[in-house]
Image: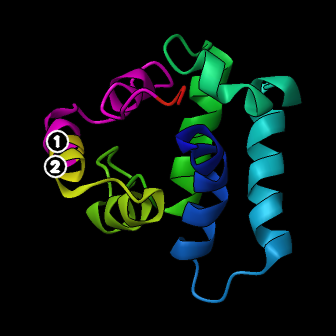
Amino acid sequence: MHAVKLILYFGFLVQASWALPTESHVFQILFYCRRKASVPVEDLINIHRLWDKPSNNLLCYMKCVSENDGSLKKNGEVNEESLDKFLKAMEFDEVLVKKVKECVRQVPLVKTCEDMRNLTQCYPDLKS
């Protein structure tokens, strides 16, 4: 269940970050990042299976979306407002929300695609 929500997460963050987002704008960002990072559609469909060891391309995709939707600030810091929206959308219990937030606060600035791996490790096992 969390895997499906994660796939929708990227679209949700884009919508939540723009004042009056249109569906086409959301898809433009997702499509742009998929092309920029050369991520096969199959990888996005199977993201739950790849979560433990995402490819560099998938990490670059996540970084691109995060930069373009405002969930990553220009300096590479996680935007806490976007994080709160994401955690609410994922419907995690309060204990897990606290654990994720503590982990994210300890993550170094995201400057490279590989740096996104640190963020992915803050989230629970998404295979369920």
Dot 2 falls on a residue whose secondary structure is: helix
On whether residue 123 falls in the magenta region, the answer is: yes
Q: Are circles 1 and 2 on residues that touch, CB within 8 Å?
A: yes
36 displayed left or right of 91: right
Residue occupying the point 24% across, 42% down: 100
The residue pinned by badge 1 equals: 99
- Residue 3 lies in what quarter of the image? top right
Dot 1 falls on a residue whose secondary structure is: helix
- Numbered range of the magenta stretch: 101-125
Choose between 53 and 59: the one closer to the eye: 53
Residue occupying the point 84% across, 35% down: 35
Residue 48 % position (x, y): 61, 27
Residue occupying the point 47% across, 64% down: 89
- In the picture, the disc for residue 118 is none
126 displayed left or right of 73: right
Which amino acid, mark 1? Lys
Residue 101 % position (x, y): 20, 48
Residue 94 % position (x, y): 20, 57
The residue pinned by badge 2 equals: 95
Q: Is residue 51 visible?
A: yes
